[in-house]
Image: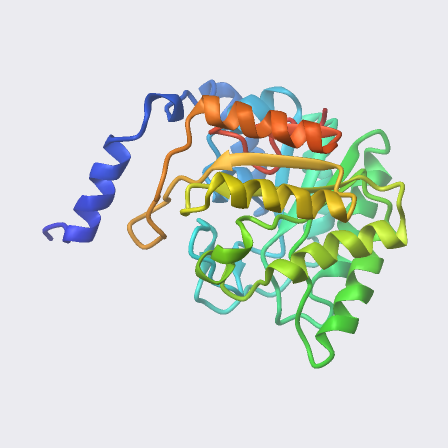
Amino acid sequence: MPSSPTDLDWRTEVQALPPWLRRSIGTASELSTVQQIIKQRQIHTICEEGRCPNRGECYSQKTASFLLMGPTCTRSCGFCQVDKGHAPMPLDPQEPDKVAEAVGLLGLRYVVLTAVARDDLDDGGAGWFVKTIDAIRSVNPETQVEVLTPDFWSGKDAEQQQRERIATVVGAQPACYNHNVETVARLQDRVRRGAKYARSLDVLSHVKALDPSIPTKSGLMLGHGETEAEIIETLQDLRSIECDRVTLGQYMRPSSEHLPVVKYWTPAEFDRLGAIATELGFHHVRSGPLVRSSYHAGE
């Protein structure tokens, strides 16, 4: 079947990637070991589902990001590689133990637990995060666990439910609580269908109100048409709610069905934005074209 014009445009876009966005994903042995353990247990990592360009590097540093509650999301964000548009999978009651076993087999020192949005579940999946954290700690007590959660906004009384779900996860004392704003306020509706900028800020604010000792973190994917002034304003908004850590990376279009890239920010521009973030008071800043939410998370 001949390719459609859209497919051809996307292929041309991929071929025209700036040189700083081309890199090896790591050695075959590092990748295959993790992939085999994950596949055998029928669990998922965002490293693989999202085709992260840093997965080989992270695996070699004993860090990985697990994707909980299946590979299908109930939302349909315009930038995300994760599958959507189908009925979510039933929860696998053995998933927390399977993840804990994989953590032990891989000798992971730092684990990030993230999840698809599960607006179909009564608690949005908050309790599942806790079950998985507990399972990991029961067999790997030295492993630190960071969470990267959805906004937990669903149900009849969504605002109250969001607060209760965040409190559930905070009660498990994660090493860091991450929730990404993903883009600047002006572009939220286009990029994050079903999410709201203020709502995401509320997630991080609630965490700090519940337990100020837990570091909070957020991230942006640049390239959707935002301006530098808008990025700085977003960083200021995050610092105003005492967000401790931030990641800035380049959006790379996963397929012709996803939003096109408006701009490729240069390494020098990322360095400048990272310096601004540091000046604003973030304690840990990662800013670069290939940076992703969990990049060097264990540091």
The answer to whether residue 225 is visible is yes
Residue 173 located left or right of residue 96: right
Q: Residue at x 33, y 48 (%)?
A: 260
Taking depth in this image into account, of 134 and 181 the one nearest to the observer is: 181
**Quick one: which residue is furthest to the front in this view?**
229
Q: Tell me residue 208's x, y (percent).
A: 84, 49
Residue 297 falls in image quadrant: top right
Q: Residue at x 74, y 79 (%)?
A: 157
Taking depth in this image into account, of 210 and 148 the one nearest to the observer is: 210
Taking depth in this image into account, of 62 and 155 the one nearest to the observer is: 155
Residue 198 located left or right of residue 165: left
Q: How many marks?
A: 0
Q: Tell me residue 250's x, y (percent).
A: 46, 36
Q: Tell me residue 12's x, y (percent).
A: 20, 38
Q: Is residue 33 depicted above or below 12 in this figure?
A: above
The answer to whether residue 105 is visible is no
**Quick one: which residue is furthest to the bottom in this view?**
156
- Which quarter of the rendered picture does the C terminus lie within? top right
Q: Residue at x 61, y 46 (%)?
A: 234
Q: Residue at x 60, y 45 (%)?
A: 233
Residue 266 located left or right of residue 194: left
Model colouring: rainbow
Q: Is residue 256 depicted above or below 109 in this figure?
A: below
